[in-house]
Amino acid sequence: MIAVLFSTLKGMFLTALTAAVSENLVLVRAFGLGELDYEEFTPARALREGWIVTLMAVLAAVSGWLGRWLISRHFPLLPAHLQPPVFLGIFTVAFLCIMGGIILVRRKKGKETSKKRYKLHTAIAFGFLPLGVLLVTGFGNSALGESMWMALGAGGGYALAMLICWSIRERLDLSDIPRAFRGAPILFIYLGLLSLALFGLVGHQLAL
């Protein structure tokens, strides 16, 4: 019993860890610091956006798993190119229900939420990371629990990448950088070196 429990926890941890550190797209997305303006970007705001991304990724994982179950049960002959709209439809309905519930609760309490925040949440929900989790889960064969752990790891990796990019920009602002490398060039160089370090942790074998 203990061995089975340990094996399950180990599998969950490795799934989350892989999703957190092995996808360079996380760093690519964080290069733009999400939907936040650079002047408004702080570690607190990064963490706030990070947990929203994580929640949306978990919702996407559940939607993808549910869509896969629905297709296998009721539409087993549905072509692969028609399956993503099913996943996306479930995810969209779930997102709209959650956002509608939040709006109703806030209005009953007399609280108003700016349109900018709603726009931010929508942009995050339909950004590359939740939709990537949605497709991976929908076309994969992982169980619901493993899919949710992958989503948690991807969201945590996104938040970590946001904080790393903030730290990089803070350091670069205090550095004497040659004019030709200021701005995007030096940031791409910095992120490229960091990506190589993470790539080394994951491991890579050259194709023969």
Image (cartoon, helix red, strand yellow):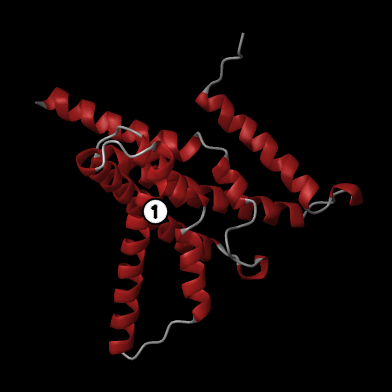
Residue of label 1: 88
Extreme residue in the top direction: 208
Q: Which residue is drawn at 31% across and 40% down?
A: 147
Q: Residue 95 location in percent, x, y?
A: 35, 64
- Number of residues whose C-alpha sits closer than 10 Å to that of mark 1, classed few (under 14), some (14–19) or many (20 or more): many
Tell me the quarter of the picture where residue 188 sits: top right
At which x and y percent is residue 90?
Answer: 32, 56
Q: Is residue 156 visible?
A: no
Relative depth, front residue between 173 and 72: 72
Residue 162 picture location, percent across and down: 56, 53
The answer to whether 16 appears left or right of 200 in the picture is: left
Check the picture and name the quadrant holding the C terminus. top right
Q: What amino acid is labelled 1 in the image?
A: Leu
Judge by depth and name the residue closer to the eye, 62 or 111. 62
Q: Which of 48 and 79 is in front in this view?
A: 79
Q: In this view, does 151 lie above or below 119?
A: above
Left or right of 128, for residue 168: right
| Residue under the image location 52 percent in, 65 percent down | 45
